[in-house]
Amino acid sequence: MPAQIDTQWEQITSLRAEGKDIPLFGVPFAVKDNIDAAGFCTKAACPLFATEPSTTDATVVSRLKNQGVIVVAKTNLDQFPTGLVGTRSPCGAVANVFDPDRVSGGSSSGSAVVVS
């Protein structure tokens, strides 16, 4: 298990042991790859954009973590969120899991696939 996931697990289990209300305890969560999540690189589908993991979370990620979610992955997207169909990424096109002849959805294509 990646270290950042272990760290998140330790943080939320510690808070729970202290009696804190953690409504989303342990819910796995994937972050669109143009949003910072500590321990993960934020590349916006550009391999040269970020080579080091983020050291901080974006506000939205921080708020979700405070409720107990665990960031487990980053999702692919059209490079620099500029596409319409999820096929403009050097990391590869994001496939529609239900019908490969259809697109997975705009610049948030990886997020759409994770939800489906």
Image (cartoon, rainbow, N blue to C red):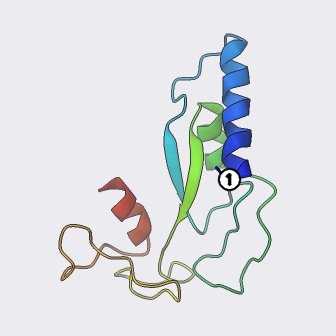
Q: In the image, what residue occupies the spot 52% across and 83% down?
A: 91
Q: Pick the residue in front: 64 or 52.
A: 52
Left or right of 4 in this view: 90:
left
Residue matched to label 1: 2
The quarter of the displayed image where residue 34 is located: bottom right
Image position of 48 (left or right of 97):
right
- Rendered image quadrant of residue 15: top right
Residue 56's spot in the image, x, y percent? 78, 53
Q: Where is residue 17 in the image (x, y as percent from the top left)?
A: 69, 14
Three-letter amino acid code at the position of disc 1: Pro
Q: How crowded is mark 1: few (under 14 residues within 10 Å), some or many (20 or more)?
A: few
Is 110 displayed left or right of 10 in the figure?
A: left
Image: 78 above or below 3? below
Q: Dot 1: what SS?
A: loop
Q: Residue furthest top?
A: 19
Relative image position of residue 88 (x, y in whole percent): 44, 88
Q: Residue at x 59, y 48 (%)?
A: 71
In the image, residue 3 sits, relative to residue 105, either above or below, namely above
Report the quarter where the C terminus lies: bottom left
Position above or below: 12 against 97? above
Residue for point 60% across, 76% down = 44
Left or right of 31 on screen, residue 110: left
Q: Which residue is drawn at 49% across and 86% down?
A: 89
- Please tell me whether residue 75 is drawn above or below residue 56 in the rendered image: below
Q: Residue furthest front?
A: 1
**Where is residue 102, by image quadrant?**
bottom left
The count of marks equals 1
